[in-house]
Image (cartoon, rainbow, N blue to C red):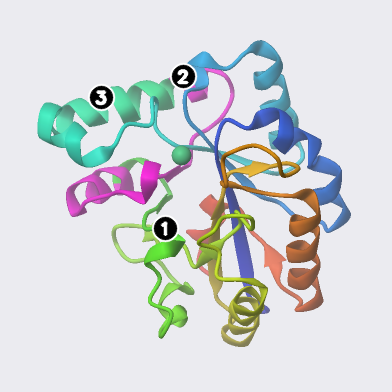
Amino acid sequence: MPGAIALTFDDLFVGNWHAARPLFDAFGARATFCVCKIHKARPRQIAKLRALQADGHEIAYHSRTHPRLEPYLEKHGLAHWLEHEIDAGVAEHRALGFPAESFASPFHASTPETRAETARRFAVTRAAGPRSLNRADPASRIYHRLDPDRAVDCLGFCDLRHSAFPGWDWQMRLLDLIAETGGTGVFAGHDIRAPGRKSEFFSTPEDLRRLLGAAVDRGLTFVTLREVGRSR
Ligand SMILES: [Zn+2]
């Protein structure tokens, strides 16, 4: 097996994700868009999510209102979180035609208790973020099979303009390692747009073109988040 990457983009940057469709198509790349607050999405945003899904991208679940997990659990408890932040929003996704088969934890936060519950509901839970990677052991986040909690931690960034992005040399080393080991690495990002706004949670289309090209050059395949859960 040549190895695979799962590129994930969070929140609700639907217009810019939709605008990147030709770029993904040019590399035969499929990505996963992890959507929160779908109850606030406008009809044209829903239509664009449907177009992305029809292209073969995954529309995954990213909570209903994107709360901070720890204070939420302290204040309301696990059952309330599951009812309001998981099950209610999953029902909204499904009513709109999005199967919500995998889950990306907001702020990369999870606990053994939340992971046990999300494992019952989703094929895969995306857990820790790329900033917590032990850079002495990146292979620990290249997956060949899932643990019983069906959780995967992010290997790298696809917010390539974020100040915490370790740089292209490191990114290429990660891709090389995936190709050598034949496993799957998960990358986390948000928006796809030109520079200029305050937030650093984004890549430019040119950044993304470079990343997609580097993956194709190494013979890597593109998988969606739920496909990370399938045995390889
Ligand atoms: Zn988010």
Which of the 4 quarters of the picture holds residue 51? top right
Nearer mark to the viewer, of 3 and 1: 1
Three-letter amino acid code of the residue under disc 3? Glu
| Residue 111 falls within the magenta-colored stretch | yes
Classify residue 87 as left or right of residue 166. Answer: left
Query: Viewer-proximal residue, 187 or 192?
Result: 192
Q: Quadrant of the N terminus?
A: bottom right
User: Residue 217's spot in the image, x, y percent?
Assistant: 81, 76
Asked if residue 115 is positioned above or below residue 176 in the image, the reply reads above
Query: Viewer-proximal residue, 51 or 193?
Result: 193
Sequence-first disc among 2 and 3:
3
Asked if residue 213 is positioned above or below residue 180 in the image, the reply reads above
Q: Which residue is the site of mark 2?
A: 92
| Residue 66 falls within the magenta-colored stretch | no
Q: Secondary structure at mark 3?
A: helix
Three-letter amino acid code of the residue under disc 1? Gly
> Residue 83: which numbered mark, if any?
3
Nearer mark to the viewer, of 1 and 2: 1
Which of the 4 quarters of the picture holds residue 163? bottom right
Classify residue 193 as left or right of residue 94. Answer: right
Callout 2: few (<14), some (14-19), or many (20+) C-alpha neighbours within 10 Å? Answer: some
Q: Is disc 3 in contact with disc 1, using a CB cutoff of under 8 Å? A: no
Q: Which residue is the site of mark 1?
A: 129
Classify residue 165 as left or right of residue 140. Answer: right
How far apart are labels 3 and 1 at the CA level?
Answer: 25 Å
Instruction: Name the residue at 29% across, 62% down.
Output: 148
How far apart are labels 1 and 2 at the CA level?
Answer: 26 Å
Q: Is residue 165 visible?
A: yes
